Amino acid sequence: MVFKRETLANLLSVSEARTRILDKFSPLNGEKVRLEDALDRILFDDVFASQELPPFSNSGMDGFAVRAADIIQASREYPITLKVSMDIPAGKAASGTLKNGEAARIMTGAMLPDGADSIVPLENTDSSEKEKDISGQPVKVFQPVQKGEFVRPKGQDLPAGQLVLTAGRKLQPQDIGLLATLGQVEVNVFRHPKVAVLSSGDEILPPEAPLTPGKIHDSNTYTISALVKQAGGTAFNLGIAEDKLEKVRQRLDQAVDLSVDLILTTAGVSVGAFDFIRTLVESEGQLDFWRVNMRPGKPVAFGSYKGIPLIGLPGNPVSAYVGFEVFVRPTIGKLSGLGNLSHPITRVRLGEPVESDGRESYLRAFLSTENDSPTAYLAGHQGSGNLFSLVLANALLIVPSGVKSLPIGTEIDAWILNIC
Amino acid sequence: MVFKRETLANLLSVSEARTRILDKFSPLNGEKVRLEDALDRILFDDVFASQELPPFSNSGMDGFAVRAADIIQASREYPITLKVSMDIPAGKAASGTLKNGEAARIMTGAMLPDGADSIVPLENTDSSEKEKDISGQPVKVFQPVQKGEFVRPKGQDLPAGQLVLTAGRKLQPQDIGLLATLGQVEVNVFRHPKVAVLSSGDEILPPEAPLTPGKIHDSNTYTISALVKQAGGTAFNLGIAEDKLEKVRQRLDQAVDLSVDLILTTAGVSVGAFDFIRTLVESEGQLDFWRVNMRPGKPVAFGSYKGIPLIGLPGNPVSAYVGFEVFVRPTIGKLSGLGNLSHPITRVRLGEPVESDGRESYLRAFLSTENDSPTAYLAGHQGSGNLFSLVLANALLIVPSGVKSLPIGTEIDAWILNIC
């Protein structure tokens, strides 16, 4: 019997496959973490301001709190003299009310006393004293101020009750600072998805083993585990399984024992390698699909093993990487509660013509800026085993399904890879 | 005596200040880490390929390894019959040389035998057998192949000795995979800079303490520690020091005991707060500068305490944040050995007019895409105490020194903030 070449049109499209995968996942539970550990975690609940900010009206300058009406006529030639009735350093409550004709010496950030409505900066007075107590003494003011000038009114930054952070946001340093200033020491975040990573293939040796003829060193375990971590998951490395049904089963059962949220396998490149995983998925779970109309990465599989979702990535290192970016990163994002699951798209100009085979293609490219616009060149040899070309690349170009060639200068979608 | 208003022109420019800071730092030492822990670490040495990749010529398809010359006349009507002389699964060395008229059954990734130069895919033969040994049997070939077709030649991805990763690169998942496939289990990276973070100010309470009149909750410790972590440093939180010389000295001495590479202080907003740090820096080290012509963040200081470099950030939360981005992130980057210390610049269009005061200004802005180009609107109230506006922002607009107003539609540089 002769193998039939699969018709590309019969294969699941990338977007159908992604939808079928994502539909099977829901965001995980939340957990409380201390603010010190909250960077890049995904917020579980909306956060509302528990108080207004600033919590009290305060001075934006070192100077004197006054009533603007008292000094409306002040000038350098005809200064107005006020009596210093109190002294308000930062961190102290103002005591008493400022009366007509009075000034309160006040430091930046200190609480505005009742009765005062404006701040005269120190340099617009005849005082330069910041330390010694000058209460009871006179101070000459050389300039009027507008009512409210140099006052930071309470609630200026934020009214109490306002929505400040939305569930699904990846927490940034300033978010953590805001939570602290609102008096929180902990925050509810989605827990990290637990992801088991299993490589298989009789040709694969761990990096520490000396190479023997016909063997190559494993890369997928390392690339995929690092991608899992980068995407916000916790990777559990199940190692390299031999191409034997019972060896693969043992490793998958380890993943079950670990109660992971997702199993990722990368099959050896040999044709039989995925067959064991497929057999086990079909007997102990369900196989949803195992081919997608894409390049590289056609042999991507999705199913479950003993109730745990499983995504089977191809064995070629670049195919596994692309499969991760297309299917697994959004899956980990959804499990993590991330609000936005889409890769940001950058439009780039082709610096050279590009050929494809009609599948939705993800091409390794190097972007450089020419005439102020990002211009893409293919990075290295595009063979799906060629990991080095992915190291050279800083973007993946997305050639849509059905397209076989694109001339130089075409505008095309790209995903920027996170290279510094 | 009347305080003189400082002339802006007398102040150090942002770029001079940054240069003076960066000139005082050198990259730290390296340390070995396991590949599992290498994500986002900065590579210490250039890495050269210790072997070629792939290490041997191998098959890109399941099929038969042949000599192209043998089947040049093959067609569906007049197939050419070869004798299957060997069977090469992935991971096994090919034994023996392929002779004229022979074919070797070969799986994807398996080693090409000597004598063979091309692969005939299974579907272009009368065989569909992948499991059973068919050595000695005949196989009919229906199509010729080009010499080299479906062969991945040894060294196609990478010749031995090639520079593959450059010192100063932040390690990406694919880099880690490449190191693994080259047989490395560890990699030399720059050690993490140790950064002490000290807040001061009598008005500052830790977030867990109930607010009393005149007090606010600390945010800087949290924002700055998270920024340190995000920039690749390890933050040591020295807590909040009272505005007393001995209290500040105690905390700075803790930083010395910890042998940190950098001390960051955020002064309380009161004028006296930085004075203690300045006094200590002047008596126990050296003060290089303490004012910069920028907004927010003018009172940025640089010096050393007992031999340890110290950057004094302003106390206002937004000023501290901007000061970090402008001066501290590149400093931590330099200590970490990072190759590129510049923020990526994005050109954006002003969606509204913008005013400045002539200092180099960093304005919180929200970018949205309009007519395919990023358009910037100011985010919230720009007061330097208003942290919430930084939470609303996704970019900092950079208004150059000397500019006081920019009309709507102006193109301007921006730093994108890392918000998801």
Image (cartoon, coloured by chain):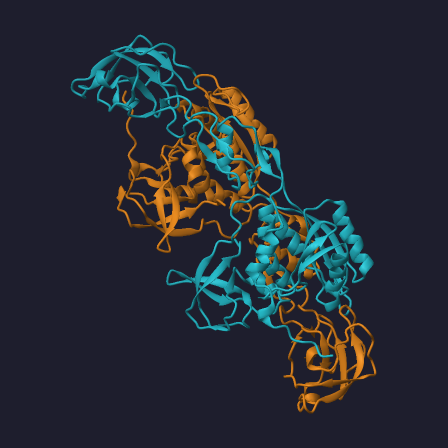
Chain colours: A cyan, B orange
Which quarter of the image is occupied by the N terminus of chain A? bottom right
Identity of the residue furthest to the top in this view? A136
Relative depth, front residue between B394 and B163: B394
Identity of the residue furthest to the left in this view? A77
Give the percent coordinates (x, y) of residue B293: 34, 38
Q: Answer above or below: position of B397 versus B251.
A: below
Q: Residue at x 73, y 61 (%)?
A: A278
Relative depth, front residue between B336 and B373: B373
State the count of labels: 0
Can the viewer see residue A205? no
Q: Residue at x 67, y 69 (%)?
A: B54
Relative depth, front residue between A88 and B3: A88
Report the side of A235 relative to A212 (left or right).
left
Residue B175 appears in which quarter of the rendering?
bottom right
Residue B122 appears in which quarter of the rendering?
bottom right
Report the side of B80 relative to A25 (left or right).
right
Give the percent coordinates (x, y) of residue B255: 57, 31
Q: Answer above or below: position of B228 versus B64.
A: above
Give the percent coordinates (x, y) of residue A142: 22, 20
Give the percent coordinates (x, y) of residue B57: 69, 74
Report the side of B276 relative to B71 (left or right).
left
Relative depth, front residue between B167 and B285: B167
Can the viewer see residue B2? yes
Residue A66 appears in which quarter of the rendering?
top left
